[in-house]
Every structure is written in structure tokens, then in C-alpha cells.
Amino acid sequence: MHGAFQHARRERHFGQRLFLRVQGRRAAGLTTVSSAGTLPGLVVAGFGRHCLVETPDGQRLICHPRGKKSQAVVGDRVLWLPSQDEGTIEKVEKRGNLFYRQDDMRTKSFAANLDQVLILIAAEPEFSESQLTRALIAAEAERITPIIALNKSDLAEPFARAWAKLAPYRAMGYQVVPLAVKPKTDTPVANDAQTAQLRELLRGKKTLVLGPSGAGKSSLTNLLIPGAQVLTAEISQALNSGKHTTTSTTLYWLDDARTSALIDSPGFQEFGLHHIEPMQLANYMPDLKAHAQDCKFYNCTHLHEPGCGVISEVKSASGPSGISASRYRLYSELFAELSQPPRY
């Protein structure tokens, strides 16, 4: 169905290897079969119902879910059974976390078992604070460490405005790093010191790169993983019957030992949080959470109640460590959105 794939060339970055439907070799020969007949693997790419699974020795093959609906996402540890030159996923192992968004109609899962999420935003055009806040809340809800990367540091004035806009987030304790990665270039140009800092942040971690379309995610991936475009094209063709797609999520190893991974995800325009209970919202916003404990009522919504520690802090505008007006407005809007009955 997908055609034969040759062994990856030796010069491919860090030994990224594809062994998809290798001719004359059955999947059962890829690694040792357990006593139960299933094999361990890591999901490293996915599109629709198809997954690319990597074996412990670094070989990769296409797997399909057992049944009509795929439950596996990139980052999942799975058990699979060989089936001729492909495989069938029999079980998804227990997850440490799952990063996802949810709107009225559907849930979009990005990746599982993450150490951190790198939220990439751009100084120009000006980033959406609402999108940033939603991504941070989703990360907090799953206890995943978020890092904010502000791209286009080479544009002095727009970057200075955007950097100032992020002051409340730095005050909350979020790490904010500058980047200058230009999108849509064959050879991405970046600041060497900034790239070195970013590589150090990624070392030994499994990191999802998240951001709106046009923020520079693909250019960042190509900068950190030379040859990623070629690998992505091969994976896309394998998983989507020969069609090239950029709507899949893909895991790339950053080192030979496979201890550091970068997961590239599709861009988004909307980020739904319908899986978050409105009464839990303040717990996932560090600036509000710091003052919610001062509220008079245990079930305070922080919108109108007397003796509310959050409202008191907003009115006092005590300083950079307080709650900014824009952040409180975002909280109010999100609370109202999440309190609406579902539309079916």
C-alpha cells in the first residue's frame, strides 16, 4: 500500500531511521517478540488512523489501531503485534500526561508523556495573548512545564513591545526566551547564542513545539534538526498513501542516544479549553492562584463576590507581581466561555 522504503542514508541527522515495509523482511524480525506476542514501541508520528512506531532498537514501521478508532498519539508507549510487514497496536500504556485542546465538537490531542511545551509566538504580527494564555492553562492542567519562546528578536521595536507585553508572565515565573528564526527560508538563520540556550533547555527532555500558524515552528525544527524536511516528507508519504501533508505531528530525536526529543505539531488558530472546569480555571493561572487563597468564600468565582482576594489585587494594581488588567479580563472571558452549556 505504501511502497518499500530504503534504509535511511548514513548522513541523515543523528541516525533518524525509517524501516517502513522493508521488502523481504517481516515486522516480527525487527525486534524480540515478548512472551505474550506483543512488542514494545514508541509512537513517533501520526496521521489519521495510521501511526509510525519506533522499536527499542530504533527501527520504524507503520501500525494501525485495533478497531475503528485510533487512541494512540505521538509520545505514547504502545504494545503492538506484527502483521506481515506492518503492525497492529494492541495497547496504549498508561500515560504520564496528555496535552490536548477541546472545543464544542471535537478533541485534538497533540502528544503524550511530555516533559515540557515550548510555546512559540512571534513579535510581529503581534501575538495573541488569549492563545498564549490558553496554551499555558492546558499545560498547567496536565502538569507540563511551559516555556515561552518569542521569535523575531531581530526586529527591534516590535520585539521590545512584545517583550514588555510578556512582563507579567516572567513575573509569574514562566521562562521566556528570545529567538530570531526566520520562516520560509531554505537555510534558517538564527542567533548562535540563542540557539545554544534553547538546545540546553531541550537537553534530556521530550518537548512539544506549539504555536499558531506562521510563528516559525517549521523553521525552528529545520534549524535544530537538519534534514527534517526530507524525513517529514517520507513519513507523510508513508502515513497518507503518498500524499504530502503538514498536518501530522512528528517526533524527532535531537541526539544519538535518543534522550532528547522535539515534537513538531500543526499550527492552530483556535485553542479550546472545554475540558477545563470553570471553577478550576484560577488554579491554572499562577497570578490568580496566588491571591485566590485570600478569598472570603471557598467557592468564589473571582468575578463579583465580596471579600475576593483576586478582585482586591486587581483593584490595587500593586506592581509587576500582581494581576494585570488584561490577564483578569482573559480570566473573565474564559470563565464565561467555559460556563456555557455544550452545543450539540
Image: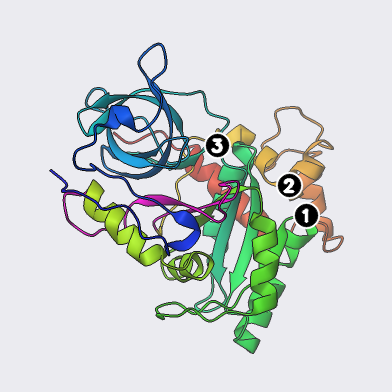
The three-letter code of the residue at mark 1 reads Gly
Question: What residue would you read off at disc 2?
Answer: 286
Residue under the point 43% across and 67% down: 218
Q: Is residue 252 left or right of residue 230?
A: right
Disc with the residue nearer the chain's start (2 vs 1) = 1
Q: Which residue is mark 1?
A: 173
Q: Are marks 2 and 1 in contact (CB under 8 Å)?
A: yes
Q: Is residue 312 above or below residue 149?
A: above
Dividing the picture into quadrants, the one containing residue 326 is bottom right
Residue 149: x and y, percent? 62, 65
According to the image, label 3 marks what residue? 113
Mark yes or no: residue 70 visible: no
Q: Quadrant of the N terminus?
A: top left
Mark 2 or 1: the one toward you: 1
| Residue 228 percent coordinates (x, y) | 41, 63
Q: Position of residue 231 (x, y in %)?
A: 35, 59
